[in-house]
Image (spheres, rainbow, N blue to C red):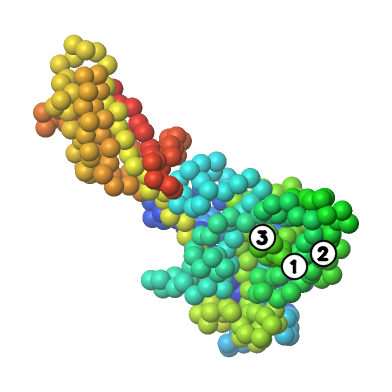
Amino acid sequence: MKTAYTTLFSVKLRHSFYMGGRSTEVFVIRPTPWSRRKLRQYGLVFRPQEDGFTVYTEIEPDSEPPVVHKPIGQDTLRFAFLLDAVNPYVESISEVPRRRQGSLFYFNNLRNDKKDGRLHLSDSVAGARVGNAIRLASGASFTYSFAAPVNRATIEIKDLFGSHVHRTSFSFPNPGEATSEHRLDLGEVRNFVPGRYVLTDDHGGTQTIYYDPELSHSRPFGLVEIFSKTDTLTTDGSDQVPVDYRFLVGQEVKPVPPYHLQLEALRTTWRYQVMKTYQSNGIDLSKVTIFGIPFDEVRESEKATFTSRDPVPLAESPPTLELRHSDKKIRTLPGPGLSTPLQEGAAQGSYLSEMYVYV
């Protein structure tokens, strides 16, 4: 019996820190347990690759355009994939918001971000390729925190598309009694499936979570959700998957380019502290310069400090900088590496890479 498979969709991981942009040493990506069961349910095959993964589907042999072998009907395909960081320095080299322990960066294919022929994944809620990290709720119980102690409150849960999921209220009979948090039993919420949710209270507070009780032993850097369509999930029946991102039309497979999850290298101010190894080595620090990019210079009797005028992207192969004395090359300077410590700069969200050089 003849069988045939084709690509349903694929994801490529890219990071501008690395030469060529390919990210092969940063993440391991895998389906969540819930998604693994969904892949089996629809007869789909997940295959990890060096720089991402591909999901394949069996198709009717010789069908053109390709038709899925196992009928999907009107179902919406939705899968989640975990990004586990295998490089311990990934957040030190990436232009991403700072992330608290127990939170993750969220990406999906619901935002139209096509550039140079590439379909970029992003945080559709934040409207950016990388949004603020959201809390991972990996247990049946979740503790909701209020901005200030309250005597009574109503908490509402809405899904990614703004649909009402659950509402609960509490109050204390004693007007003087108050609490700054309330425990929710998410495991008792009807039809509460893994996904992104927003919790709000009637005192103006809000918290965003990704709920999946099977991830209690996971500490992922991020999570990617892929949708085939959303018309069965939105209250108005709209399909929020951009046209160019849709890989299924009915039962027909629509070829789409790989989705790209792109991370940019962190831009830092580079500072070199140049000092003499021996006072009698003939080097005059007043005549030492750095050639390659513009630096501001501060000279003291014991050292010369060079600070880049503009932030420079960290890179696996950094720009070539030469340390010169009286315009003669002394040595090639190292750029910041994976393990170079980061210091917070004077401006919010800025960082400094400081290196010490002895001549």
The mark nearer the N terminus, 2 or 3, is 2
- Figure quadrant of residue 303: top left
Residue underneath mark 3:
205
- Foreground pick, 252 / 173: 173
Q: Quadrant of the C terminus?
A: top left
Identify the amino acid type marked 1.
Glu
Identify the amino acid type marked 3.
Gly
Residue 210: % across, % down: 68, 60
Q: Which mark is residue 156?
A: 1
Element assignment for label 3:
loop
- Is residue 89 found left or right of 35 in the rendered image? left
Q: Residues within 10 Å of mark 2 (few under 14, many from 20)?
A: few
Identify the amino acid type marked 2.
Ser
Q: In this orientation, does residue 92 appear?
A: yes
Q: Residues within 10 Å of mark 3 (few under 14, many from 20)?
A: some
- Figure quadrant of residue 134: bottom right
Element assignment for label 2:
strand
Q: Quadrant of the N terminus?
A: bottom right
Residue at 82% x, 64% y: name it: 169
The mark nearer the N terminus, 2 or 1, is 1
Q: Could you tell me how far apart the alpha carbons at marks 2 and 3 are, in whole angstroms?
A: 14 Å
The mark nearer the N terminus, 3 or 1, is 1
Residue underneath mark 2:
169
Which residue of the protein is positioned furthest toward the left in this rendering? 326
Q: Which numbered mark, 2 or 1, is in the foreground of this view?
A: 2
Q: In this orientation, does residue 3 appear?
A: no
Residue at 67% x, 68% y: name it: 79
Q: Could you tell me how far apart the alpha carbons at marks 3 and 1 are, in whole angstroms?
A: 11 Å
Q: Are marks 2 and 1 in contact (CB under 8 Å)?
A: no
Residue at 76% x, 72% y: name it: 165
Q: Which numbered mark, 3 or 1, is in the foreground of this view?
A: 3
- Residue 203 vertical position relative to residue 339 in the rendered view, above or below: below
